[in-house]
Image (cartoon, rainbow, N blue to C red):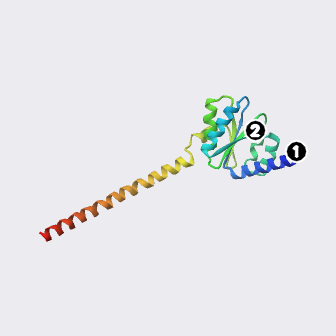
Amino acid sequence: MDRTEKEDLVASLKQVFADSAIVVVTHYSGMTVAQMTELRGQMREAGASFKVTKNRLTRLALEGTDFQDLGDMFTGPTAIAYSRDPVAAAKVVVNFAKDNEKLIVLGGAFNGQLLDVDGVQTLAKLPSLDELRGKLVGLLNTPATRIAGIMQAPAGQVARVIGAYGASEAA
């Protein structure tokens, strides 16, 4: 990898860190290509990404970002999981690590706050942004359907009364 490629990699990682709400650092030693492909597919479905990184270049990219405190975690075979959704990356990585002991969660950062392994696992237990939106829409939608039902009932009764009155006048 020549100097310009390294500079491009650092610049793209800086952009990743600027666009992400959460970054989870993992060790992936011993994972097969099929396992990595499966993990990346699960991450894409959740709206997150998983990337194998070069430690020295990643530490350079972390400088001046909200995630600069993660620098000490980059030793050995590391990869990062990241997303704009504050829960998606953590949820997928933690769930995948339960079934695959070769993926080890080292920690992460969320909104500039350093998280240990327990912090990442706690964050993974929270509902995702899409799940919360769905619940909110459900809560807002329920009263609206009730109001529509209540509003239609009197209108139907009024129509029946007018219809009966009109029928009695015609007779």
Q: Name the residue rendered at 24%, 62% in the picture.
A: 157
List the residue tagged with mark 1: 2
Q: Is residue 140 left or right of residue 163?
A: right
Q: Name the residue rendered at 52%, 51% in the picture.
A: 133
**Mark 2 element type:** helix
Image coordinates for residue 108, horizontal then vertical, percent: 69, 42
Q: CA distance from mark 1 to mark 2?
A: 25 Å
Density class for disc 1 (Cα within 10 Å; few <14, some 14-19, many ≥20) is: few
Nearest to the observer: residue 166 or residue 23: 166
Relative to 123, is 152 above or below? below
Q: Amino acid at mark 2?
A: Met
Say whether residue 119 is visible. no
Image coordinates for residue 44, horizontal then vertical, percent: 63, 43
Q: Residue furthest front?
A: 170
Q: Name the residue rendered at 75%, 38% in the picture.
A: 73
Relative to 92, is 146 above or below? below
Nearest to the observer: residue 26 or residue 155: 155
Tally of numbered tags: 2
Q: Which mark is residue 160?
A: none
Q: Upstream in the sequence, badge 1 or badge 2?
A: 1
Q: Which mark is residue 73?
A: 2
Q: Residue furthest right?
A: 3
Asked which quadrant contains residue 109, the reply is top right
Q: Quadrant of the C terminus?
A: bottom left
Relative to 154, is 89 above or below? above
Density class for disc 2 (Cα within 10 Å; few <14, some 14-19, many ≥20) is: some
Q: Residue furthest bottom?
A: 169
Q: Is residue 146 left or right of residue 100?
A: left
Q: Amino acid at mark 1?
A: Asp
Say whether residue 116 is visible. yes
Image coordinates for residue 144, horizontal then vertical, percent: 40, 57
Nearest to the observer: residue 143 or residue 3: 3
